Image (cartoon, helix red, strand yellow):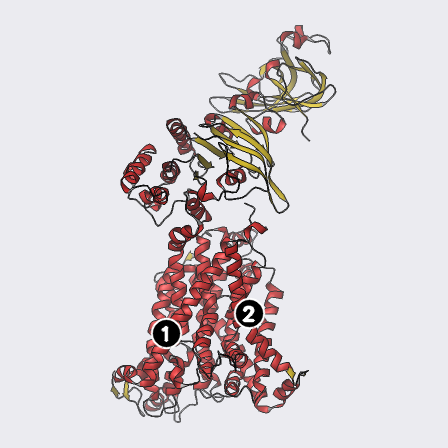
């Protein structure tokens, strides 16, 4: 199990900085994700680790060994390419055995290890086939076996599931996770699919414009995004803009629809009076009839909600979309801010289009973030 | 992936070494000879002068030659367009029974240099040849018709058109196929249809492709040496240059003529770049273009079959005439030969001149093909896999020989290397090999380029990732995967080298070095069995080229057309 250290990696292509001063520590045996929108530099970073590019600045360490200038064929990484990159002039077995032949492994050991690797990806019966005779999912498995069979220091996966259909993608997620757990190999997995990352990763680095925006376990990234980009990119969220009026917990943000409170410690450093946004996940918002407890409404400015640990916003339903297992509501707050929310047990419609609603959410569900540049 | 720019780290020693070899090769064997001709044409006695051009334009013979050559080029280009355009539309835009067969047949005329066809055609269309005799016997005419009126002009035009229309067809078809159907669909969508659609959308989009083909055809006809020689239509630029190549030192007029040809060529390319340079409509890179062809109705099928069969039929007349001539025992004042024999095929391998020429051609072509494989693969590899400065320049230089008449190159070699160890009077072998190699390099580059392009870079990266170094990756992964393309390009280069006309005629001075084409030409001078043996030799060449074109077509498929484009 090899750990990886990336120190201040920068790579430019002409005037474009594809990777900008990235530092990441990846523990041995970790299933580590590089997640971000297309063009964020995640694939470039992976190719830098594989050695296909050399960084303009910074260094790459496998354990304590500096491999920054090591050519790709001496790095002992196993890469799974987005298009699988199986060699069409070789059989499945020959594809998988290629790396072992180069490592001068004895023929009998080659056979054993190829069979073992093909067995692990459940392709043992297809050894004599040509890659062209395999489906996309099967090619994917062979590519994985080829990367694993050399017992690489680190397995690099470049959007491995992006060419598969939705059902197969779900299946392969479990497969890759299983293989990771069985082999215990350090794996770095590049994807733009946040669901893939959230469901599989030990840890995730969210990348934006060449830089790492946040690194952490899926849960912490989802629940405590470091900035507005991460909050927006991971899952869905609503932003309500305002000004920070209390910088100790619980935070208070004065917005056009009233004061919102948050009990979540912000990752970014914020100071009193900063322009901020409050991120509230759609599933954290509850809907109630504004008249139901109108009696409790007190004069504006009084801190009712904070006392109850609850934030209140008023708005009007614009549209609802019923999807069987859940129902989506689009609401426009009184100041015009759009809000999305989700009812996960849509037994009955909570409010139809045009109906005024009262939205409530717990202060622990509100994350205060610096206003994005 | 941002791969367009290069940085210094891409300039590995290997890349620099290859670029160095290429610079030397092209510098010595492509640019130096042409420059040498230019300098000799403009500088006499250390002084700049345009005197020879004056001489050239004053001489009535040269005037006639210039006019004739231009007429040849223009009429041939027009004729090939008329033949090829409807063919291309039918074969690209319609689906019908036998499409593959007819599409293949359409290319058959390419398998023979027109000057070989000319030998057979002369037999058939002579004053008392088969056709006139047939017409006389059936009473359709009273006196023999002069088919090649104008001193052979029409004979040359017809043979060249029948030989060159496949090149025009391949270019137009490729251009048509590359017009993204969605562009036409969107035009239909806004209400343009039928001829209007063709005129306003399809035609403008395919125009650059058409001109690429037209320029090749024009230059080919303008500078073709073999066909006018056989028809003894001597007042053309090519024949004049050929005559003067034997005394380059005494007569400077040859330089002026060659320079003139170079200028015409450059002007054509300049014009085409100026008008179409920025307009590359090819959408090949977009991957598979949805099929834009529609099923032909039965009426359309009949029309298409009729058209294609009659074109191919007519185009095959020269070939048939060569076949007939090659097996003729006696053919005098009769429509068809009165006695047949296969003796000439045997004689080819017994006769000193022919046997030697076959051996010479094989040896020269093999050597030139080896050079082409090495240089072509290296160039294609650099162009597709590496980033380096002056990439476009290398691309252009490698393609230049397609546009450069063999005549010009050969003349440049004779004059530029005279008195050096490469002097053709010592031995033309090195320069013949190099001339063939330079002339056929574009086919090799294109074929290999297509192979590299079809092959995803990740296949090579995966190999390196598995632990294979660059050389092993090249050997185990890259080469096996582009092998078919390299083989196709090599075979094509080889066959065209075997049938190379102008440089063979000019460079091979002594009989012991004659390649096949020069042997055929010199056989024609022999009264008795000359034409028959020449035809038998021509047949051999045809069979060779036919097989290699079939193979190349199989490997390259639709990309075949790209081989013949500038």
Residue at x 42%, y 59% (from the top left corner): B558
Left or right of B63? Residue B505 is left
Give me the chain letter of mark 1: B
Residue at x 52%, y 66% (from the top left corner): B399
Left or right of A336? Residue B495 is left
x and y percentages locating residue B10 in the rendered image? 55, 51
Residue, disc 1:
B363
Label 2 to label 1: alpha-carbon separation: 25 Å
The answer, for residue B302, to whether it is visible in the render is no
**Do tags 2 and 1 sit on the same chain?**
yes
Eyeballing the image, is B180 above or below A50? below
Residue, disc 2:
B27
x and y percentages locating residue A208 in the rendered image? 59, 34
Residue B531 picture quarter = bottom left
Eyeballing the image, is B438 above or below B258? above
How many numbered marks does the figure carry? 2
Verify CB contact (< 8 Å) between mark 2 and mark 1: no
- Taking the view exactly as shown, the residue that stands out farthest to the right is A273
Classify mark 2: residues with Cα within 10 Å, few (<14), some (14-19) or many (20+): few
x and y percentages locating residue B306 in the rendered image? 38, 69
x and y percentages locating residue B453 in the rendered image? 46, 54
Eyeballing the image, is B75 above or below B447? below
Question: Under tag 2, what secondary structure?
Answer: helix
The N terminus of chain A: image quadrant: top left
Q: Earlier in the sequence, mark 2 or mark 1?
A: 2
Residue B366 picture quarter = bottom left
The C terminus of chain A: image quadrant: top right
């Amino acid at each position: 199990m090899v750990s990886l250290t990336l120190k201040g990696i920068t790579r430019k292509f002409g005037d474009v900085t594809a990777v900008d001063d990235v530092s990441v520590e990846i523990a041995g045996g970790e299933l580590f994700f590089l997640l971000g929108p297309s063009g964020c530099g995640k694939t470039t970073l992976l190719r830098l680790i594989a050695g296909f590019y050399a960084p303009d600045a910074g260094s790459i360490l496998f354990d304590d060994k500096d491999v920054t200038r090591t050519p790709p064929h001496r790095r002992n990484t196993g890469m799974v390419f987005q298009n699988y990159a199986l060699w069409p002039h070789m059989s499945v077995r020959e594809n998988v055995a290629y790396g072992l032949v180069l490592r001068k492994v004895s023929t009998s050991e080659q056979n054993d290890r190829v069979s073992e690797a093909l067995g692990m990806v459940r392709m043992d019966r297809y050894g004599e086939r040509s890659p062209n005779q395999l489906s996309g999912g099967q090619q994917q498995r062979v590519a994985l076996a080829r990367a694993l069979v050399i017992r690489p220091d680190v397995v690099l996966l470049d959007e491995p599931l992006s060419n598969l259909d939705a059902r197969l993608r779900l299946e392969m997620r479990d497969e890759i996770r299983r293989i990771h757990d069985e082999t215990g190999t350090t794996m770095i997995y590049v994807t733009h699919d946040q669901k893939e990352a959230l469901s599989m990763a030990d840890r995730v680095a969210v990348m934006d414009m060449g830089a790492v925006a946040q690194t952490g376990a899926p849960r912490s990234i989802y629940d405590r995004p470091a900035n507005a980009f991460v909050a927006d990119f991971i899952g869905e969220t609503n932003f309500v803009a305002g000004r920070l009026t209390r910088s100790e917990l619980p935070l208070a943000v004065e917005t056009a629809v009233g004061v919102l409170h948050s009990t979540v410690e912000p990752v970014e450093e914020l100071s009193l009076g900063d322009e901020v946004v409050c991120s509230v996940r759609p599933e954290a918002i509850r809907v109630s009839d504004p008249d139901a407890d109108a009696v409790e409404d007190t004069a504006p400015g009084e801190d009712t909600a904070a006392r109850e640990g609850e934030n209140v916003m008023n708005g009007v339903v614009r549209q609802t979309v019923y999807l069987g297992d859940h129902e989506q509501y689009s609401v426009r707050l009184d100041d015009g801010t759009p809000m999305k929310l989700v009812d996960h047990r849509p037994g009955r419609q909570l409010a139809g289009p045009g109906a005024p609603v009262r939205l409530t959410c717990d202060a622990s569900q509100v994350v205060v973030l610096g206003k994005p540049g | 992936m941002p791969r367009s720019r290069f940085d210094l780290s891409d300039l590995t020693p290997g890349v620099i070494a290859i670029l160095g070899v290429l610079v030397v090769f092209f510098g010595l064997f492509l640019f130096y000879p042409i420059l040498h001709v230019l300098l000799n044409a403009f500088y006499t006695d250390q002084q700049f002068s345009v005197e020879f051009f004056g001489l050239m334009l004053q001489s009535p013979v040269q005037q006639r030659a210039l006019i004739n050559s231009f007429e040849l080029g223009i009429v041939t280009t027009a004729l090939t367009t008329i033949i090829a355009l409807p063919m291309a539309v039918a074969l690209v835009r319609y689906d019908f029974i036998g499409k593959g067969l007819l599409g293949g047949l359409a290319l058959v005329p390419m398998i023979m240099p027109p000057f070989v066809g000319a030998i057979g055609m002369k037999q058939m269309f002579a004053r008392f040849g088969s056709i006139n005799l047939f017409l006389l016997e059936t009473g359709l005419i009273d006196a023999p018709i002069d088919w090649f009126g104008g001193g052979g002009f029409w004979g040359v035009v017809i043979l060249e058109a029948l030989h060159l229309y496949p090149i025009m067809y391949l270019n137009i078809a490729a251009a048509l196929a590359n017009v993204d159907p969605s562009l036409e669909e969107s035009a239909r969508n806004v209400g343009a249809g039928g001829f209007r659609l063709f005129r306003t959308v399809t035609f403008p989009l395919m125009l650059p492709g058409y001109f690429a083909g037209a320029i090749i055809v024009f230059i080919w006809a303008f500078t073709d040496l073999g066909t006018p020689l056989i028809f003894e239509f001597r007042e053309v630029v090519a024949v004049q240059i050929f005559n003067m190549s034997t005394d380059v030192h005494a007569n400077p007029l040859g330089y002026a003529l060659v320079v003139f040809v170079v200028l015409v060529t450059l002007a054509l390319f300049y014009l085409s770049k100026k008008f179409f340079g920025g307009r590359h409509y090819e959408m090949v890179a977009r991957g598979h273009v949805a099929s834009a062809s529609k099923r032909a109705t039965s009426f359309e099928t009949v029309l298409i079959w009729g058209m294609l069969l009659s074109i191919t039929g007519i185009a095959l007349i020269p070939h048939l005439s060569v076949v007939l001539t090659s097996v003729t025992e006696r053919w005098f004042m009769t429509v068809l030969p009165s006695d047949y024999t296969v003796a000439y095929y045997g004689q080819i391998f017994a006769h000193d001149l022919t046997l030697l020429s076959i051996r010479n051609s094989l040896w020269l072509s093999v050597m030139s093909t080896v050079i082409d494989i090495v240089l072509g693969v290296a160039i294609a590899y650099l162009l597709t896999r590496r980033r380096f400065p002056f990439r476009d320049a290398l691309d252009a230089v490698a393609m230049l020989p397609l546009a450069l008449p063999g005549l010009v190159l050969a003349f440049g070699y004779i004059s530029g290397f005279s008195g050096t160890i490469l002097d053709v009077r010592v031995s033309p072998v090195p320069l013949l090999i190099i001339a063939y190699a330079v002339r056929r390099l574009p086919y090799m580059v294109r074929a290999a380029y297509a192979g590299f392009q079809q092959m995803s870079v990740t296949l090579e990266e995966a190999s390196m990732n598995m632990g294979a170094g660059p050389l092993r990756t090249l050997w185990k992964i890259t080469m096996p995967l582009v092998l078919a393309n390299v083989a196709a390009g090599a075979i094509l280069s080889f066959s065209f080298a075997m049938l190379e006309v102008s440089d063979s005629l000019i460079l091979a001075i002594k009989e012991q070095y004659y390649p096949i084409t020069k042997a055929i030409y010199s056989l024609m001078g022999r009264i008795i069995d000359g034409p028959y043996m020449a035809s038998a030799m021509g047949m051999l060449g045809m069979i060779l080229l036919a097989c290699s074109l079939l193979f190349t077509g199989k490997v390259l498929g639709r990309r075949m057309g790209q081989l013949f484009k500038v």
